[in-house]
Image (spheres, grey):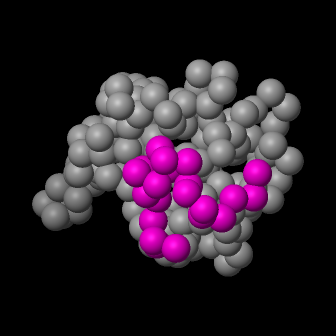
Amino acid sequence: MTEITFWSLSVVLSALLSYATCANAQEANCTDTSYGWAFNSLGLSPCRVAEQLASPCNINVSITQLPNISYAYFGPPAGEADPCRCSSVYYSLLAGCAACQDANWMRWNNYTQNCSTVYLTIFPSPIPSGTKVPHWAYLNVSIDGEFDPTEAAAGGRGRSFDA
């Protein structure tokens, strides 16, 4: 009986802590000023553009600030993978969002592990009206296996684009 009570209490405490963490989550902002190149032509950060690209798949995403540099944004969970989030364009924006916070990002193959189909260098859904995707988001991330901010900042230097 004591184990069940302790277990129940720990589940309730975990739920309350998760709620408090979500309730206090702040919108992701680029804190590293050297990432000015990552913003689109409208002055939106890669975090905001990624949020806009989730909408064609009927996903209301609010990308929150990573707590510290050892955190990263994960790929879509099992059963929730969709064409928007399984696109390298979305992945690159999410990785760019992490990079401009001086945080980590996942490798492309780890990010897409729950995707049955991946969309490399393309965004498979119609881009929402008024959304401007920066050209660097179309880089072929499979060449290095992950987002490369140095390559993105340099404009790709011959890398594959589909823009």
Question: Would you place residue 69 above or below residue 33 in this image?
Answer: below
The relative height of residue 55 versus residue 163 in the rendered view (above or below) is above
Query: Left or right: where does residue 63 sit relative to residue 125?
Result: left
- Which quarter of the picture shows residue 44? top right
> Which quadrant is the N terminus positioned in?
bottom left
Q: Residue at x 66, y 22 (%)?
A: 42
Front position in the image: 139 or 82:
139
Magenta-colored segment: predominant secondary structure = loop
Magenta stretch containing residue 156, yes or no? yes
Magenta stretch holds residue 162:
yes
* Place of residue 43 in the rendered image (x, y in percent of width and height, measured from the top left): 59, 21
Say which residue appears at 13% left-offset and 60% top-offset: 2
Residue at the extreme left of the image, as rendered: 2
Quick check: 121 above or below 47? below
Considering depth in this image, is 100 or 74 the residue closer to the camera? 100
8 vs 111, left or right, is: left
The x, y position of residue 8, in whole percent, is 27, 54
| Extreme residue toward the front, this view | 157
State whether residue 123 appears in this view.
yes
Does residue 85 appear in this view? Answer: no
Residue pictured at 60% horizontal, 63% vertical:
159
Give residue 55's position: percent from left, percent from top. Answer: 74, 41
Q: Quadrant of residue 110?
A: bottom left
Q: How many marks?
A: 0
User: Image check: 54 left or right of 156?
Assistant: right
Residue at 17% across, 55% down: 6
Q: Which residues are magenta?
A: 143-163
Quadrant in which residue 74 is drawn: bottom left
